[in-house]
Image (tube, rainbow, N blue to C red):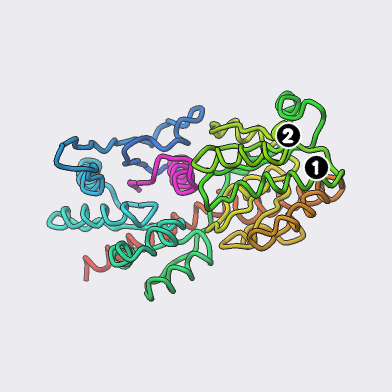
Amino acid sequence: MKIGITCYPSYGGSGIVGAELGLELARRGHSVHFISYAPPMRLGDGNAWRAGVQFHAVDMLSYPLFEYPPYTDALASKLFEVAQEESLDLLHVHYAIPHAVSAYLAREMLRDVRYLPIITTLHGTDITLVGRDRSFLPITRFAVERSDAVTAISNYLRDETCEMFNTDCPIEVIYNFIDAEYYRRAPREEVRRRLAPDGEKIILHISTFRPVKRITDCIEILARILGSGGARARLVMCGDGPEREGAEELAARLGVSAHVEFAGKKPQSEIRDYLSVADLLLLPSLTESFGLVALEAMACEVPVVATRVGGIPEVVEEGETGYLFAVGDIEGMAEAAGSILTDDGLRKRMGERGREVAVSRFATEKIIPQYEALYRKVLFKQSALQKG
């Protein structure tokens, strides 16, 4: 199949999954065309550029009349152009706004020649934040309902979408996935010595540092762990964003700055190294539609302490691969984290179970065929309609 994929070229889960999906499809012999304003970040890792993968840049118009560049229109034009030139079989867009809208426009422009099916994958904030805004709700609903197939990355997100938009549009749940061979715990002693030179346990947090991630909770949890006289620990904060300054100030105010490293944004290869030496992942988010970083941690045998929100309970097994708490339960999360960090046997059991769950339920071998089957179903239905 010839597949066009549009996703945001950023650290967020939608960009990661869109890029990884395209690479996996190319490995399976499909022709994959990424269409966006920049190459997805995962395509820059190692030898990611390979046969079967092409990138098409969206050209943006700079014109004084426009306060903001009209990306939706530019993307629609590029989707139309690539679909024509490369004879794409379908478009698979990640994020309803604006990508599904642009895909719809491209399909309409091409309609006099042929019909171009659209698959839309919902990732979370396109529905729970952007789509909920009254100014975007009608267009988001329109984009979802005009797609030939819609997928969501968790049961939680599927149910939230149906309720929020009062739609009976069929939505298939296809979970996020990991390459289980790439994400596995590996000896990285030099990384451990650098992050924890005095042999401390390593607590890891990875996010975009937006308010929804509640990164200051990580600082407070660390302060309680250190204050309890239990585990000697260091908190490594990977990422960047608007909440970083407040977290740094809180660390200083609580007297734990010496035990916190703000590592900044890291390439995925370095994130994997960090996961290979981590003793615990903290994920105190206000909401998570899936929790991809939790899955990556589990694949690397890292127990997870997280909030019981969104799709996280569909990934993290309570008491088996980690512990889940209400949003803002600092005391509960600190106590659970402390118990994991001070009990090597518990940490090892949880880590091994996490790896088992990640491989058996979320590996590429389990998930990618679900997308391929969906593509074939959509194409078969369209072919039948044309013949009828």
Observer able to see residue 143: no
Residue bearing mark 2: 259
Q: Is residue 157 above or below residue 303?
A: below
* Secondary structure type for disc 2: helix
The stretch in magenta equals 1-26
* Secondary structure type for disc 1: helix
Q: Which mark is residue 128?
A: none
Q: For residue 17: magenta?
A: yes
| Horizontal side of residue 269 vs 388, given as left or right | right
| Horizontal side of residue 221 vs 349, given as left or right | left
**Residue 119, percent from left and from top:** 35, 58
The amino acid pointed to by label 1 is Leu
The amino acid pointed to by label 2 is His
User: Residue reaching furthest left?
Assistant: 112
Near-viewer residue (315 or 174): 315
**Residue 104, percent from left and from top:** 24, 57
Residue bearing mark 1: 226
Going from the N terminus, do you reach mark 1 or mark 2 first? 1
User: Residue reaching furthest front?
Assistant: 253
Residue density around tag 1, few if under 14, some if 14–19, many if 20 or more, within 10 Å: some
Q: Is the C-beta separation of discs 1 and 2 under 8 Å?
A: yes
**Residue 38, percent from left and from top:** 35, 35
